[in-house]
Image (cartoon, grey):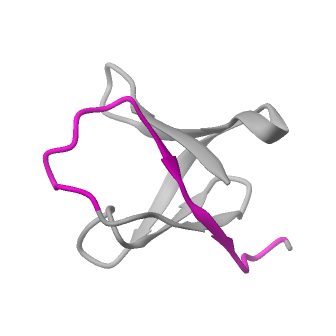
Amino acid sequence: MKLMIRMDRKGILSAYVPKKDLEEQIVCIDGKKMWGGVITLANGWRFQLPEMAADTTLPVTVEARRVAGERD
């Protein structure tokens, strides 16, 4: 599923899911790094992000895999 990851001026990360026209704040990054790890959105959805360089410039659109979350 395509996700657009961005950071606002306050440093808050969010993800936009175009297929669902949904934008949610990223509330949890499992592990020490975002790229290649699992993120959790404010609505409970979880996504496995692809491996990318730590200094990847935001905003960026990636192909992520949705994994089981709290509200599935």
Q: Is 62 rendered above or below residue 67?
A: above
Find residue 20 and report its horizontal and vertical position in percent. 83, 40
Q: Is 10 rendered above or below residue 12?
A: above
Judged left or right of residue 45, residue 12 is: left
Main secondary structure of the magenta stretch? loop
- Residue 55 part of the magenta-drawn span: yes
Q: What stretch is highlighted in magenta?
A: 52-71
- For image coordinates 72% across by 76% down, the residue present is 69
Q: Is 15 rendered above or below residue 50?
A: above
Check the picture and name the quadrant holding the N terminus.
Answer: bottom right
- Residue 26 part of the magenta-drawn span: no
Q: Which of 63 and 34 is in front in this view?
A: 63
Judged left or right of residue 60, residue 22 is: right
Find residue 63 and report its horizontal and vertical position in percent. 54, 53
Q: Nearer the viewer, residue 57 or 23?
A: 57
- For image coordinates 41% across by 64% down, the residue present is 50
Q: Is 60 rendered above or below residue 3?
A: above
- For image coordinates 56% across by 60% down, the residue present is 64
Find residue 47 and report its horizontal and vertical position in percent. 58, 66
